[in-house]
Amino acid sequence: MNYRPLILSILFAGWLTPAAAEQVELSEQDIQKLFPQIVLSGDGAKQRFEAAGIVYHERNNARRKGRWETKNGQYCSAWPPNWNEQCYTVWREDDVLTFIGPDGRRVERKMVGAPNQTAASYLTSKQMALLFPKIIAKASNGAVQTFDASGDTKYVYPGGATSVGRWRIDAGKYCSKWPSGESCFRVIREGDTLTFVSSSGQRTRYTIRQR
């Protein structure tokens, strides 16, 4: 992944309280972890998932057995008799999953036995404004970014080169402005990891520590 300073950001883990749940796109890792823990219910049917890649569809007394996997950030499933695979992006809000197919068609299913959504809660504007100046964000390539309360932000590349920009919070989003332009992101906290979600749904993760 090409890390750039306009993507970076935020947060001192111990201060955060989960924000109200909002719709969040699930990554492949999210899907792999979540699906074996839940049962999906809707249209009079239920679906159950095994970690080994088996999925069951149950309606009345009839039961079908198919297979599921994750691929290119999507949930994919195939069913007999033709086993044609179909893939969907998956969004979660509380105990509801929304599956969006390549044609844009949306199907909602309710989860039974779903774990809490605390790991996928967006940070609020207030949380980000309080915490950004207190942390250092680090990318997997070794670059680090700091945030001053004045609105200045500094990005230090692994080789030592530095870029200086401006950061702000706008309507629940972290925004940073550099000579190349400005970009804004929703931010999710999971332990000491921050995930930045762009308007297109692309996710980029960073680790944080106290400044």
Image (cartoon, grey):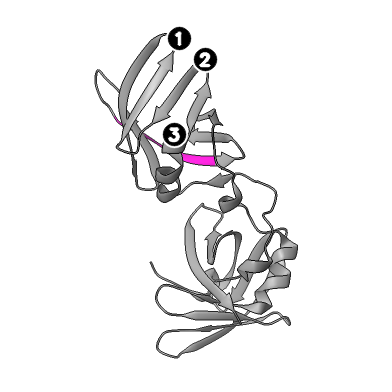
Query: How many labels were placed on the picture?
Result: 3
Q: What x and y, as percent, mark residue 42? A: 53, 21
In the rendered image, the vertical position of residue 88 relative to residue 206, given as above or below: above
Q: Disc 3 to disc 2, how far (Cα)?
A: 21 Å
Q: Earlier in the sequence, mark 1 or mark 3?
A: 1
Farthest left residue in view: 82
Residue highlighted by disc 2: 44
Main SS of residues in magenta: strand
Task: Identify which residue, 85 or 51, lies in the foreground.
Answer: 51
Q: What residue type is labelled 3?
A: Gly
Residue found 41% across the figure and 50% down from its top: 29
Residue highlighted by disc 1: 60
Residue highlighted by disc 3: 101
Is residue 152 located in the magenta-colored stretch of the structure?
Answer: no
Q: Which of marks 3 and 2 is in front?
A: 2
Q: Disc 1 to disc 3, how far (Cα)?
A: 26 Å
Task: Identify which residue, 167 or 97, lies in the foreground.
Answer: 97
Q: Which amino acid does label 1 sit on?
A: Asn
Residue found 29% across the figure and 37% down from its top: 52
Q: Residue 97 carries which label?
A: none
Residue found 45% across the figure and 9% down from its top: 60
